[in-house]
Amino acid sequence: MTGILRCGRFRLTLDRPLIMGVVNVTPDSFYDGGRHVSTAAAIAHARRLVEEGADLLDLGGESSRPGSEAVSLDQELARVLPVLDGLRDLEVPISVDTTKPAVMRAALAGGAAMINDITALGAPGALEAVAASAAAVCLMHMRGEPKTMQAEPVYADVVAEVRDFLATRIAACVAAGIARERITIDPGFGFGKTVEHNLTLLRGLGAIVALGVPVLAGWSRKSSLGRITGRAAEERLASSLAAALIAVQHGARIVRVHDVAATRDVLAVLDAVQGAP
Ligand code: 7PJ
């Protein structure tokens, strides 16, 4: 593990787990969709997450929740770019969550320091779009596509299959000229996986960590936590914090969360324990 993530003009040190705060600019995201639809509201939310201690932000204009429909290029650009522009002065890197090379190029030109792609730069031109920049990338594993991905996903060995996919995508990035210090990987909890698959991946996260680039984990408010606890998305804070903590204890270096302040406190306790004499 390099211990550093290069994100455009930023260098993130990975000697402690980092918090990526989620800023959705979508009308239909499963948890906070619709709350920040206006540009001003999204900007205000982003700034509050930074005040709460977010180390980076993830800005998304395309909902990827199970069953969601694709959004047009124009629609996605109209959602993301004004928010990005309104956050230019921010002192933390901003990631843009997109699968579209045209959005990647526009976001990178507009100051994004990272691209978070649930298809791991799988679209034609996506590798090139990131390679032409100095930005970081998050390569996520997904089985299928959001519209249909939860229809009975089947794996022989979910940890090995996710690991091998991510290893292949790291190699593709490096071959395209994206240095390893710019790459993070994510097993994609909830993306074409059953609750059991998600738990097996969490338990086996060490095999993904062993690929040698920082691992990002997103459990925040996800439906697997609802299946475990019987609670709706609004009531999944405690279970989200538990999952984030377990992910970090299994080697995740970045947690993608909606609840930054609470996650900060959880990680402070972990840090205090680990730093104790
Ligand atoms: C993830 C994501 C995740 C990465 C979403 C939600 C659903 N990107 N985008 N990892 N989840 N890298 O906000 O929970 O787990 S959208």
Image (spheres, rainbow, N blue to C red):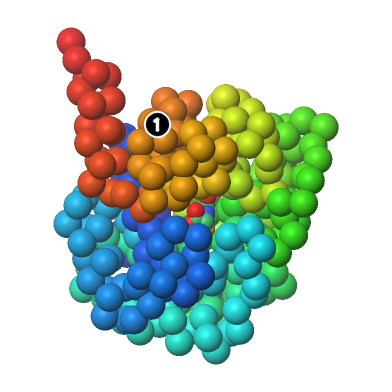
Q: Quadrant of residue 41?
A: bottom left
In the rendered view, would you say 45 is above or below 172?
Answer: below
Q: Is 60 left, or right, of 85 in this rendering?
A: right
Q: Nearer the viewer, residue 260 or 277?
A: 260
**Quadrant holding the C terminus:** top left
Disc 1 residue lies near ligand 1 with CB under 8 A: no
Q: Is 66 left, or right, of 258 in this rendering?
A: right
Measured as percent of width and height from the top left, residue 113 is found at: 39, 65
Residue drawn at 71 percent across, 51 percent down: 150
Label 1 SS:
helix
Three-letter amino acid code at the position of disc 1: Ala
Q: Quadrant of residue 178?
A: bottom right
Q: Is residue 47 visible?
A: yes
Residue at which label 1 appears: 242
Residue drawn at 77 percent across, 51 percent down: 151
In the rendered view, would you say 182 is above or below 154?
Answer: below
Measured as percent of width and height from the top left, residue 73 is found at: 58, 84
